[in-house]
Amino acid sequence: KKPLEGVTLAPTFSKQKELELALERFKSVIIQRGTRGIIGLKRQFKILDDSNDGTIDIYDFQKALTDYSIELDVKDIETFYNNFNIPETERIDYVQLLDRIIGELNQFRAAKVELAWRKVNAENSDFLDWEKINVSFNASRHPGVKAGYITEEEIQHDFEETFKALHSVSHSFQLDQPVTKNEFFDYFRILSTTVPNDKV
């Protein structure tokens, strides 16, 4: 493998402002693809993660972006490397990078997701079967359904596909694993990234 042209692989930390701006630019690109797009990119990284430790090398990082038709300025790639590099390697912690882009749920949304988890999880278990979550999902209050430009069935299908995709990535593509609470929250953290308004 040849070094990326124009990219300085020096493990020095960029200024905080540079990182924030680079993260915002990256986020503005991937949120245009919605929940499915963010999970899809996470899947691309996971496929290239040959060590299965949440890291990929700088070459595979750019390959994942290229395969997913994402164009980033070389300076932004350098900034991500310098801030998410594993010391003494050429590997990027893509899990930490995506976590920074996705962010945390605000207090209002976190309370809603906690309520949903408790409602589905009446037994107060640490895990849930996927089917139990799926049958509990109610698409009737979705803004698109209310507005009449999408059906409940379409929303249900999209929820099923995207949640299963995240579940697959979270468990190294093994779909027979139960859903954890953290995983449940992760799904809604990703969804929240694409929804700017709490009142939708």
Image (tube, grey):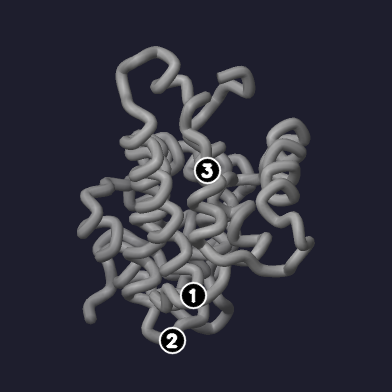
Q: Residue at x 39, y 60 (%)?
A: 165
| Pair 1/3: label in front | 3
Number of other residues with Cα within 10 Å of mark 1, as a class: few under 14, some 14 to 19, many 20 or more = some
| Pair 3/2: label in front | 3
Camera-side residue of 132 and 96: 132
Is any atom of residue 15 visible in this view?
yes
**Disc assigned to residue 51:** 2
Q: Amino acid at mark 2?
A: Ser
Q: Residue at x 50, y 49 (%)?
A: 135
Secondary structure at numbered mark 1: loop
| Pair 2/1: label in front | 1
**Number of marks drawn:** 3
Return the residue found at the far top.
147
Q: Earlier in the sequence, mark 3 or mark 2?
A: 2
Place of residue 97 in the rendered image (x, y in percent of width and height, measured from the top left) = 53, 58
Taking 118 as reference, is 185 left or right? left
Q: CA distance from mark 2 to mark 1?
A: 14 Å
Q: CA distance from mark 1 to mark 3?
A: 22 Å
The residue that label 1 is drawn on is 171
**Disc assigned to residue 137:** 3
Secondary structure at numbered mark 2: loop
Taking 124 as reference, is 93 left or right? left
Secondary structure at numbered mark 3: loop
Taking 179 as reference, is 139 left or right? left
Number of other residues with Cα within 10 Å of mark 3, as a class: few under 14, some 14 to 19, many 20 or more = some
Placement of 154 over or under 100, stated as above or below? above
Number of other residues with Cα within 10 Å of mark 2, as a class: few under 14, some 14 to 19, many 20 or more = few
Q: Residue at x 32, y 24 (%)?
A: 150
Pick the quarter of the image with the N terminus. Answer: bottom left
Q: Amino acid at mark 3?
A: Phe
Place of residue 4 in the rendered image (x, y in percent of width and height, measured from the top left) = 27, 67
Pick the quarter of the image with the C terminus. Answer: top right
